[in-house]
Image (cartoon, rainbow, N blue to C red):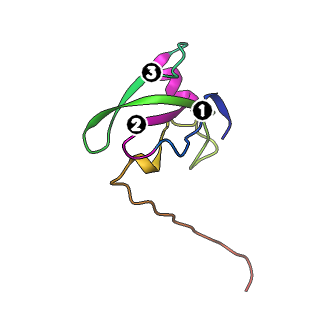
């Protein structure tokens, strides 16, 4: 993903540090119009409503369908979401035997 403003997550964005998020440009425009979102707060409800500081903005990406507009998206630092259990689901298709 191409970063448009701010910074990426770093090792400092861990449990106990100020909660940080990165927004895609679609969500940043919806929330802040033309204002700079870096350093502003957004409230996300993971276990309970909590403010997160916007540290970066990235270009929106398409996920499920190349024919639909990219959705508004927020990215969290996994190290700050202690109840999160990271998993990876991979589906592989191969032609032939």
User: Which type of secondary structure does the marked residue at label 3 adopt?
Assistant: loop
Picture residue at 49% right of the left edge, 37% below the top: 73
Q: Are marks 1 and 2 in contact (CB under 8 Å)?
A: no
Q: Specify few, some or many for label 2: CA neighbours under 10 Å numbering under 14, 14-19, or 20 or more.
A: many
Picture residue at 56% right of the left edge, 67% below the top: 90
In the drawing, does residue 24 fall left or right of residue 87? right
* Earlier sequence position, callout 3 versus callout 1: 1
- Disc 2 to disc 3, C-alpha distance: 12 Å
Where in the figure is residue 14, as x and y percent of width and height?
Answer: 44, 46
- Is residue 71 visible to the viewer in this orientation of the structure? yes
Residue 50 occupies which quadrant of the picture? top left
Q: Specify few, some or many for label 3: CA neighbours under 10 Å numbering under 14, 14-19, or 20 or more.
A: few
Q: Specify few, some or many for label 1: CA neighbours under 10 Å numbering under 14, 14-19, or 20 or more.
A: some
- Disc 3 to disc 1, C-alpha distance: 14 Å
Where in the figure is residue 89, as x and y percent of width and height?
Answer: 51, 65
Residue annotated with mark 3: 40
Residue 97 occupies which quadrant of the picture? bottom right
The span picked out in magenta is 14-32
Residue annotated with mark 1: 7
Residue annotated with mark 2: 19
In the drawing, does residue 10 fall left or right of residue 16? right
* Earlier sequence position, callout 2 versus callout 3: 2
Nearer to us of marks 2 and 3 is: 2
Where in the figure is residue 29, as x and y percent of width and height?
Answer: 53, 21
Picture residue at 52% right of the left edge, 36% below the top: 71
Name the foreground residue: 69 vs 4: 4
* Earlier sequence position, callout 1 versus callout 2: 1
């Amino acid at each position: 993903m191409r970063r448009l403003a701010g910074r990426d997550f770093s090792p400092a964005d861990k449990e106990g540090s100020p909660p940080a998020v990165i927004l895609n440009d679609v969500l940043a425009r919806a929330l802040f119009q033309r204002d700079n979102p870096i350093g502003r707060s957004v409230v996300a409800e993971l276990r309970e409503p909590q403010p997160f500081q916007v540290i970066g903005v990235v270009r929106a990406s398409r996920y499920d369908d190349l024919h639909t507009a990219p959705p508004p998206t927020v990215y969290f630092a996994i190290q700050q979401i202690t109840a999160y259990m990271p998993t990876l689901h991979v589906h592989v298709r191969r032609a032939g035997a």
